[in-house]
Image (cartoon, rainbow, N blue to C red):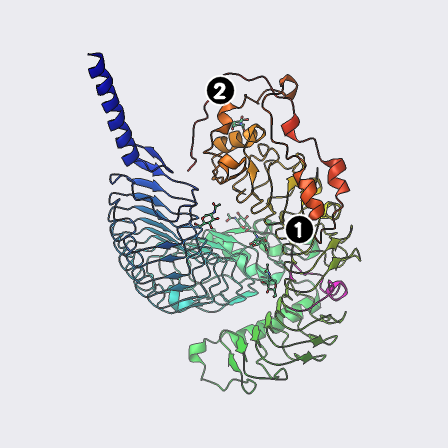
Amino acid sequence: MLFFSAAALLLVLALSSAVEAGKCPRVCSCDSTKLAVTCVGKNLTEIPPTIEEITVKLDLRNNNLQVLPRGAFTLTPYLTHLNLQRCNIIKVKEGAFRTLGRLVSLNMANNKITVLYQESFDGLSSLKELHLDHNRVEEIQPGAFTQLGFLNMLALTHNQLVYIPNMAFQGLNNIKWLRLSHNALNNLDPEAFAGLFTLSRLSLDHNELQFFPTQTMTRPPEVTRLDMSHNPMTYLGEESVSMPKLTHLYLNHMSLQDLSDQALSRAPLLSHLDLSHNQLRYLKPLSGPEALTSLNLTGNPVYCNCYMRPLRGWASVRGVKLLGACAGPPHLSEEPLQAVAPLDLRCRSRAETLKAEFEEDDESAGSIPPTAKPKQKVKCPVNCDCDIEVQHATCEGRGHTKVPRGFPTKTQLLDLRSNHFHHLPANSFPGTSQVVSLHLELCKIHEIEGGAFRGMRNLFYLYLSDNDLTSLDPRAFAGAPELNYLHLEGNRLIQFPGSALALLPSLFVLHLERNAISKLEPTGLLSSVTPKLQELFLTNNTITAIAKGALDSAFLGTLHLDSNQLTEIPTQALFEAPNLEELNLSQNSIRWVGPNAFKPISHSLKRLYMDQMGMEKMSRDALAGLGPGLRALTVRGNQLEELPDLSPLTGLQVVDLQDNPLMCDCPLLPLRRWMENVSLEVIATCGHPPEVRGQNVMDVHVFTSCPESSAPPDERVVVAPTPPNVQKPKASLSKEPGVKASPAKPKTKLPKPPKNKPQRKPVATKVIKNKKTL
Ligand SMILES: *[C@@H]1O[C@H](CO)[C@@H](O)[C@H](O)[C@H]1NC(C)=O
Ligand SMILES: *[C@@H]1O[C@H](CO)[C@@H](O)[C@H](O)[C@H]1NC(C)=O
Ligand SMILES: *[C@@H]1O[C@H](CO)[C@@H](O)[C@H](O)[C@H]1NC(C)=O
Ligand SMILES: *[C@@H]1O[C@H](CO)[C@@H](O)[C@H](O)[C@H]1NC(C)=O
Ligand SMILES: *[C@@H]1O[C@H](CO)[C@@H](O)[C@H](O)[C@H]1NC(C)=O
């Protein structure tokens, strides 16, 4: 009897464990009621072959799959949800998903996919959502999406698309929303969106489109919302927007200087037009959109004189809500447009009236419809192409050694890149006062004489990237006072060109990546010189030091100092940049971050990047002062064994702690608790002690024997002995070659490591539930 029951028990045990083993791969956790399997952050190089066939939700985030072979999921044909984010996927072979006819949602964001092959998505006949954002897609092969007849939403944001070929999205017969934001699109074939008969929403914001793709946009017939914001367009001509169903159009944050009153004449249903943050001084009543209810002109330099009277009157009569304010004249400055009475919109001085009349003439001369114009001979320099209608002229890569002259006077975009100018003498661009955007990339320029751009009164964007400049004449930019965006990346500048910038009072964004600047000095670099500078990019220089006063700028919002040679956080210098929101310090050699390092900017900072700095220690108070305002924090690829308390950072949306050798022991318990608590995807791996090396902090069990440490410190008593490696940061600090940070500083300032803190006496061990956040 006894024997029998013991044998039966053994049998039952053996059976149940066999079933368990078959059901759930060792590295995964399985929820048999929801039929969900989670194998997150295991560095898996292939899909575990023992996942139960019946699984419907499979979460494989944060692994190392690299290539998805043909038929990768044949063993799990019932999947409806598959998450492959951050799996280091480089290539999806044709037919990879062929067996997944029930899949509804596929997430492959944050991988390294560069090409979408013809049959990559074959078989996904039920798929509704496909996330391919944050990859490196630069090519969509014809037919890539032909099998996705049920797809509703395709996200291709944050990729490297430059060009969309004809019929790229053929087969998406149920697509509602196509998201192409944050690419580098500058060219869309006329048939790029052909065949998308159900598309209602199209996002093309944050690209490089220099003019409105009129013809391309006539193809998807049902689009109601189009987001084109943050593209460098300067002008919108007649009938630019020809979209019969469009109701919402976002053209904000572009560089529009002018907009034809007929630009929207073929968008009859438009109700919301956002033109905020452009460079519009005047706007005429818009013909076409009879149902317009809202016209947003916020952030334009609208000049409230008699030119604006027709618009104001039209808005009142039509019931169009005008948003925005007058930028001038002084007595109306900041007055909401909606509040200004038409009669107050006057041209008071004689000069102004004359000017108005003059421009009126000019206007009427120019407003003859282009179709009615006989094809006249366009004035254009030899070896260049000029397009009067879109006001572009280009001589790109035509071997010019001198800047050509004689462009049409209305030219707004002048593209001279890839020529061999070597040297730009004074007055190199006569008669180009309407040019807004000037491209001089890759022109082997090593010298720019003072006054080279003289007369370019409207120049807004200047691209001097990838030339051979080693210094800049202090008067190099004289006569181009409207310049807002200056690209000087990829030159050989050895100093911050402060004095040349003094002539650019409107400078807003400055690119100086890939130069040879080694110091930032307090020579009144910013606030006095470039009072409006908001974004400064200094990535990949050789900066070793930033003097106090060097960053003096009340408006600076974005500062990229990554890939330099800083050895400490430039805390002192940050005092003068009280509105800094984004700071990138990745790839410097900052081994130690002391207390209050970001205190001066703690109220404004939203994004802080400190990856790959060889950082060995962060003071417990390193992030002091930072709170709910911080949205992103990354410390990936450092040598951190501990981290400061992250729980005050309640507003975090992105956090990256990967590739740090964390010491998985009781002092890390607060981090572990925090990880369990937040609804963020946090990956953190143990580096010590040896028995848990490489395991995810969420998976190790060492914490189960830790005492509750939520009690105030004074209640704690010593509990577990800890490995004696507290000195390690200091030791390796002094060994590292080329590190100038004085080791004395950490020695005196390092807070007592929490390991040595007395802890509360052990209470009954509490098993921490192995919660996975989704
Ligand atoms: C992940 O696996 C690859 C090779 O399979 C290995 O080279 C790498 O070190 C592993 N990374 C971690 C964090 O375990
Ligand atoms: C108008 O534009 C501003 C600036 O882009 C934006 O903050 C505001 O929400 C817009 N208003 C409406 C009603 O769209
Ligand atoms: C820095 O610039 C050099 C030369 O342009 C380039 O080879 C290198 O890859 C860049 N490094 C980074 C981190 O961008
Ligand atoms: C920060 O700098 C690193 C190193 O150059 C770079 O890889 C990363 O993309 C940057 N992050 C942002 C948000 O600019
Ligand atoms: C967990 O979250 C709750 C509420 O969001 C908060 O009160 C608590 O302090 C958090 N605990 C930890 C350890 O972060």
The residue where tag 1 is placed is 589
- Tell me if label 1 and label 2 are in contact, CB under 8 Å: no
- Answer with left or right where residue 734 lies relative to residue 360: right
Q: Identify the residue at the far right of this view.
A: 523
Quadrant housing the N terminus: top left
Question: Is disc 2 surrounded by few (<14), some (14 to 19) or many (20+) residues within 10 Å?
Answer: few
In the rendering, at what x and y percent does residue 17 appear?
29, 29
In this view, 696 is above or below 353: above
In this view, 641 is above or below 343: above
Q: Is residue 602 visible?
A: no
Asked if residue 508 lies in the magenta stretch, the reply is yes
> For the point 58% across and 60% down, which residue is it?
308
Q: Is residue 302 visible?
A: yes
Give the magenta part as a residue range. Answer: 491-511
Ligand 5 within 8 angstroms of badge 2 C-beta: no
In the rendering, at what x and y percent does residue 423 appear?
69, 79
Please give the label number shown on residue 765. Answer: 2
In the rendering, at what x and y percent does residue 633 appear?
57, 43
In the rendering, at what x and y percent does residue 173 appear?
27, 56
